[in-house]
Amino acid sequence: MTFTMESKMSNKKIRAVFCCFFTLLFVCGLQFSAMADSQAAPQKEQTQNTIAGQKDQSFKNAVKAEKGTPHVPVEQLSGGSAAARAPFTEVKIEKATGKNAYSVAEIFAKSKSLDGKVVRVRGKVVRYNPAIMGRNWIHIQDGTGDPMKNTHDLVATSTEKATVGDVITVEGKLAADKDFGAGYTYAAIIEGAKVIK
């Protein structure tokens, strides 16, 4: 009888210990899960901030690349953007042919009415910045336009390549007053241009 009572007491104690142990494991598991979630949230936020920071940095690099040489005089600022600079080049290039063909000066003069329309322009590549914001930035001049009014240098963006010094024709959709932010605004820019040599 004594042995049986002691045995029953022992079993109760063992059960109680196991219950406490498993309860403790369960509570620890909940705390660990909560702790993991609280650590994951800042990491997720940090990852999102890093991605956003990379986008910001990508844009800053694009702006920096487009700015070019800081010592270019004001009269030689790009007609596309006050932030982008391309030196004025003495050239005289024959205008492109076709019903949607314009000179650089005509593009700037008619930019509002040509906004959203496909245009064709022929000129000399005076500057080329590849792979910025997923596109190549081609500055062309044809000898028309006024450097004092920043209407001599037209920028076209394209997935196609170009070489500085080449005379090419670009055709694409004109965007008037295109604002990329951070003061990086174009009075006229040709986007998604095809390059025709």
Image: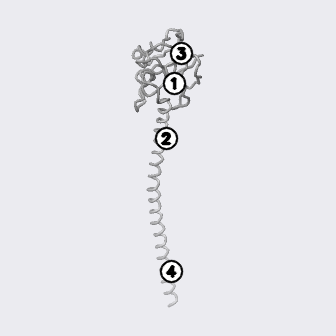
Q: Is residue 49 or residue 4 the one in the foreground? A: 49
Kindly identify the amino acid type of the residue bearing the numbered disc 1: Thr
The reply to whether callout 1 and callout 2 are in contact (CB within 8 Å) is no
Mark nearer the viewer, 3 or 2: 3
Q: Quadrant of the C terminus?
A: top right
Q: Which residue is mark 3?
A: 123
Q: Which labelled disc corresponds to residue 78?
A: none
Q: Which residue is mark 2?
A: 54
Q: x, y percentage for residue 189?
A: 46, 21
Q: Which labelled disc corresponds to residue 157?
A: 1
The reply to whether callout 3 and callout 4 are in contact (CB within 8 Å) is no
- Of callouts 3 and 4, which one flags the residue occurring earlier in the amino acid sequence? 4
- Of callouts 3 and 1, which one flags the residue occurring earlier in the amino acid sequence? 3
**Which colour assignment does the render follow?**
one colour
- Of callouts 4 and 2, which one flags the residue occurring earlier in the amino acid sequence? 4
Count residues near mark 3 (Cα–Cα under 10 Å), then give few for <14, some for 14-19, many for 20+. Answer: many
- Of callouts 1 and 4, which one flags the residue occurring earlier in the amino acid sequence? 4
Q: Which labelled disc corresponds to residue 11?
A: 4
Alpha carbons under labels 3 and 4: distance apart: 95 Å
Q: x, y percentage for residue 90?
A: 52, 15
Instruction: Give the number of callouts.
Output: 4
Kindly identify the amino acid type of the residue bearing the numbered disc 3: Gly
Determine which quarter of the picture holds residue 31: bottom left
